Image (cartoon, rainbow, N blue to C red):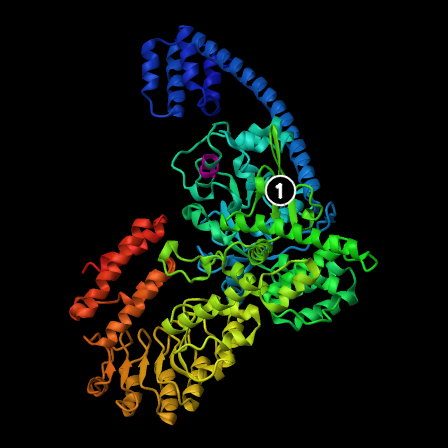
Amino acid sequence: MVEKDGCNSSLTAIRVLRVSLVDELEGWIDSLLEILVSREVFSRDDREEVLCQMGPRARVRKVLDILECKGEEAAKTFLSISTHHKQEAHQTHSKESSRDQHQFVEYNKVKQKHKDVLRRRSESMLFYNTRHGEKILFSEHYVNLLLVDGHQGLEIKRHEVLTFGQKRLSLQQKLAVHRKIAPAELFLSANENRSVKKVLVTGVAGIGKTILVQKMLFDFGGKKDNLAFDFIIHMTFRDLNLIDKPTNFRELVLRKNRHLAKELDNILANDNKLLIILDGFDEFKHYRSCDVDVFVTEPDEDAEVVEVFGSLMQGELLPNASVMLTSRPAAINHIPVGCIDRFVLITGFSLAEVQDFFLRYFQDNALADRMFAVVATNELMLTLCYIPAFCYIVCCILKESKDLCGESPKTMTDIYVQYLVALLRSHTQARAETALQAQRAGAIQQLSDVVLKLGQLAFKKLMEHQTLFYCSDHDVAALEGCSLVSTFLDKTVAQEPGCTEEVYSFAHLTVQEFFAAVYCAVTNHPLPDALQHSSSSGETSNDGHLDLFNRFLSGILSERNANLLSRQVGLSFHKEKVDTYRQRMIRELKMLCENGANILNHLHCLFEQQDPSLALSVLPQTLRVNVSDETLSQMDYNAIKYFLNLTKGKISELDLTGTGLSSEALRDIQPLLLRCESLWLGENNLDMETVQVIADVLQVSDSVTHLGLGWSNIGDEELLTLSCAIRVKKKLEELWMEGNRVSYRGLLSLSDLTPNPLKKVVAIWNDLADTEPESVCAVSAQESITVGFTDDDMWEAWGKWVFKRCEDSSNEKLVTVLHKVCNISVCCLEAQWAKTFYKKLSQLIKSRIECCTEDDMCKKLKKFENVLNL
């Protein structure tokens, strides 16, 4: 029934307001429907008819249609209910707006307070091993960063610091591919379709990972906040190591950030505006077991600290939060790679930054320039200065010795011995010229006691792979009362509610290795067997953990450094131990030269001695120098040259396979190449300039009879250059060039050189899809040229050589080799040696898969396992 006076009726109002009513009521139509039924405006049938409509807006329209039939009274009740709801909603909105405004103000207050706290915490720094309590203001000077695409850690086969030098050079040569980034750009994606939430920052010990973290906190707390975050939560694994009971993420945050308590719920709720920085993963005592399968999903859910960390990294906890993790390379294989969005490598100082460091350290332009000029003439010291912690050590030496007016350091040990003496001079009065002789003798005795106690701690913890020492440790407690301990050990305080513990570490990993070597050299402790090059396979092979320790040990046992340490520090060396070490080195060098095992670290130990008589005493029956599969730095080449320049006569074999050869490096050792009988240069990217160096050697040398250039990216043009050089002396008998770009046409350039002098040319896996029948026929007629497997002793020896390399390789290197040698078909397996070789290779792959913990690596290995199951 409709009222006749419709001008001011409720029904008219509903018709006029129909569109706006649909917009206003769609959010609470179900509640409105229940009220209309309870007021008996609608029947249950009416409600069912409304609920049959698809979507809230359709339901509102149906209600309005039914009201048309219900009449004015029903419409009036409906409008009353609607108006009352609207008023309540407005009041509620006003209250919520007021509350939101208050929360916003409080949130910003806490945000600013947190920034102030971070600024205060990061405005000064304990600068490596400065005098106890001495602090300097944090400067704007921070190390460069280089963005590395993909999982490119340093290969864990050699000592990380030794590997770093060459790795850094190769990265800086690829600046077109790897661009420098600023800390503020860490979480900015170059690809807009891919977000960056988890960033792993790696770098060798002392390269500046913690300084980078401090830089980010310093900028965030100040006026240079370029990061799109409201809050940064900073934790160190040194602190996390103290937690030995279940905890939760909320408690971890509040341990050192109580000022966040009131707003922590809002901070964690807005996790997309939260950055969590976790510094020093390699120091985490649980770092080997972080790939957890027990997760927590809520910030207040208790679990073991390793499970909280694992849940955070794998996105189960605070999935929208950003996380930055820092670690030395040695530990990154234990991080679930799949959860990392960006890998960043810190490359250390540039040359300009080294100079700037000198200026800040010496605080005098003229003096800084003079000190830098001294370093610039010493290749070893300059190379080390690219690592900030080394740069400090070098500056410390220069400060005490002024300009190294004595003999300039030639070896790593020389530098560290001078560092030890310099710090002792700087931090004690025991060396004062005015001291009485008795006092002087007592002071010397005190110095040697402290050094040996530090050495004992360093040695024991090095063997246990530990770089952090807690005051509760018996070995640390033994140092209590030693006034000089603070000179060499950095101390930080790790705090846990109800527990505060002092944590010690040497200023740098290499300083610990040096002290450990001093202890081993001076005491009756037996010499470690680690000098033997490991021949165990893959994941358990020598990771270079003791490489630098052994070099320091050799250098300390040299006559010149033993005398210096005796004179300056009062350390006594047993002649019997020195002689035993020297005889063992001679014996092992001779054995390695004769059997062709990898010899590089032994050559470095010999170099540290700087005693030519040692090299002259080796006298192997055959001189074979194998440094393959090591990316060689200039220091490596120096050690190789030092040994070979002291030896006389022919070099039976020099194996530089897979060493990252450059034309400059090859030219530098060219006089040595002339003495080689077998020269293996494969698996290096040889450009024409490098090939020309090889050609120059072949034109002059009467010794080179075997040359290996497999997988070195040479083509017809490079081969033509080599063939012209071979014709000069005609001494080369075998040329191995598997896996290159040579065609049948290129092989024809050797036709007049076979079979005399070239008795064997191996060209399997080359670009031999030549369609010119004449070229194919001409090459095929040459019995000396081999383009496929044959059943003879030559290939059997090749198989043994490849398999030995595979056994000694890491999984990463193994996959690289497999890519080269698994390009086979069934017909290739007809030779008996090939069947045996590939069967053994398949068994090796299977054993590696069983031990492999990385999913990506397992997939790669299984791919080759399938290939070999032909």
- Look at the image and give the residue range highlighted in magenta: 307-312
Frontmost residue, 752 versus 367? 367
**Residue drawn at (78%, 59%) of the image:** 363
Left or right, 166 with respect to 699, comes to right
Which quadrant of the structure image shows residue 35?
top left
For residue 672, above or below residue 297: below
Q: Amino acid at mark 1?
A: Ala
Left or right, 788 with respect to 718, comes to left
Which quadrant of the structure image shows residue 502?
top right
Position of residue 740 measured from the top left corner of the image (x, y, whole percent):
33, 75
Report the predominant secondary structure element of the magenta stretch.
helix
**Residue drawn at (33%, 61%) of the image:** 807
Position of residue 693 measured from the top left corner of the image (x, y, whole percent):
46, 83
Position of residue 361 measured from the top left corner of the image (x, y, whole percent):
73, 58
Position of residue 534 measured from the top left corner of the image (x, y, whole percent):
40, 60
Residue 26 in view (yes/no):
yes
Frontmost residue, 425 versus 395? 425
For residue 405, above or below residue 676: above
Image quadrant in which the C terminus is located: bottom left
**Residue drawn at (34%, 25%) of the image:** 54
Indicate whether residue 439 is drawn in magenta.
no
Residue 819 in view (yes/no):
no
> Label 1 crowding class (10 Å Cα cut-off): few <14, some 14-19, many 20+?
few
Left or right, 440 with respect to 612, comes to right
Residue on which the image places disc 1: 478
Which quadrant of the structure image shows residue 715?
bottom left
Image quadrant in which the N terminus is located: top left
Frontmost residue, 171 versus 502? 502
Q: Helix or strand or loop: what does disc 1 sit on?
A: loop
Left or right, 831 with respect to 147, comes to left
